[in-house]
Image (cartoon, rainbow, N blue to C red):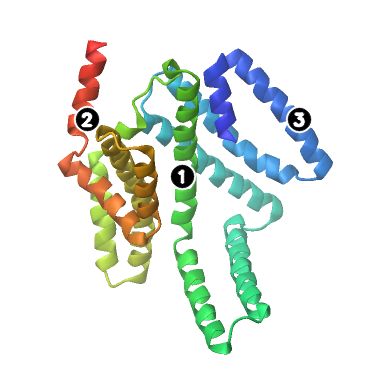
Amino acid sequence: MPLPVYYFLSIYGQKRGIGIIALALGIASGMTFWTGTLPGLLFSLTLLPIGFILARADRENKSTQQAGMLSIGYLVLVWLAAGWLIGLASNSNPYLDLRQSLDKGFEATFALYRDSGHFPAGDLEAIKAFIAQLREQVARLFPALLLTSIICTVWLNIFIGQWLMKKRDLALVKREDLKNWRLPELLVWPVIMAGSALLVPNEMFNTVGLNVGLVLLVLYLSQGLAIVSSLMQKWSLPLTIRIITYSILFLQIYGIGFVAVLGLADVWVDFRKPRLKKDVDDTSVS
C-alpha cells in the first residue's frame, strides 16, 4: 500500500500525486463495499501514510535512517492505537486474538499432515512435537515478530521505491545510496545487553533478550546486505554471480547469520570506507 503512494507523489508531485491516490482509493472503496472486505481496506489505510512520510523525507533531503525511523515509529503508534480502540469496541484483546489465530493455524497444519495418510505414526509424533515447539517459540517471540514485520515493510517500500524511481529518473533519488547506509554505533549496546539477558538464569530476562536480539538481527542483517551489495558493486561482479551469492546466503541459516555478523562487525571494521570515500570524491568532482 505505501509503495504506489510513495512513487506517485515522488514522480508527479503532491498535487497530481494526491489526485491519483484519491481516485485509486475511491475505486478501492467501491470494490470493498461491493465484495464485503472493508476490514481489509481499513487495515491497508493504516499503511497509507508511510508513502507520504517517505515522499516528504525525500523532498526535505532526510537520510534513509531518518525516513525509516519516522515510518516505523508512525506504524507502531498507529497499530497500538488501533488495537486499543478495536479492543474497546469489541471488548476483546486483538493481540491475544491474533495469537489464538496463529495457534489455530498450527493446529490446522498438523491436522493436514495427520489426515493426509502419508505419514506413519512415528513421523506424526515427531511432526507434532516439532509444531508444538514452533508454536511455543512463536508465542514467546511474538512481539519481536510484529516489530520486525513493521521494519521489513518499511525497508522494502524504501528499497523498491528508490529502485523504481532510479529506473524512471536518477535525479528523483536525492538521498544516499542504500548500499552506503549504516546503523548508529550506539546500537551496539542493546546487542550487548540482549546477549547479557540471555545469560541470566531467568525466563523473563531470556524472553526479553530473545525479542530484542531478533529485532537487532533483522537490523544488522539489512546492514550486512548493504555491505555485500556494496562490495559486489565495487568488484564489478556479473549479475549471475550476484544472484548465486544471494541465493547461497539465504538458503541456509548460517549464511543469514554470517551477513548479520558482517553488519555488526562493520561498526569496527568499516568495510565500505574506501567505497564511501570514492563516492564522496566522485560527487565533489561532478
Sequence-wise first label, 3 or 1: 3
Q: Amino acid at mark 3?
A: Ile
Q: State the residue at coordinates (32%, 38%).
A: 229
Whether the residues at callouts 3 and 1 have beta carbons within 8 Å, the answer is no
Instruction: Say whether residue 275 is left or right of residue 177.
Output: left
User: Residue 159: x and y, percent?
Assistant: 44, 34
Q: Relative to 89, is 129 above or below?
A: below
Instruction: Say whether residue 97 is left or right of residue 170.
Output: right
**Which residue is labeled 2 in the image?**
275
Q: State the residue at coordinates (16%, 42%).
A: 269
Could you give the CA–CA distance between mark 3 and mark 1, rounded to whole angstroms? 28 Å
SS type, badge 1: helix
- Marker disc for residue 152: 1
Could you give the CA–CA distance between mark 3 and mark 2, rounded to whole angstroms? 46 Å
Q: Give the image quarter of residue 193.
A: bottom left
Query: Of tags 3 and 2, which is closer to the observer?
Result: 2
Furthest-right residue in this view: 34
* Label 3 neighbour load within 10 Å: few <14, some 14-19, many 20+: few
Q: Amino acid at mark 1?
A: Cys
Q: Give the image quarter of residue 96.
A: bottom right
Sequence-wise first label, 3 or 2: 3
Q: Amino acid at mark 2?
A: Arg
Instruction: Say whether residue 160 is left or right of residue 214.
Output: right
SS type, badge 2: helix
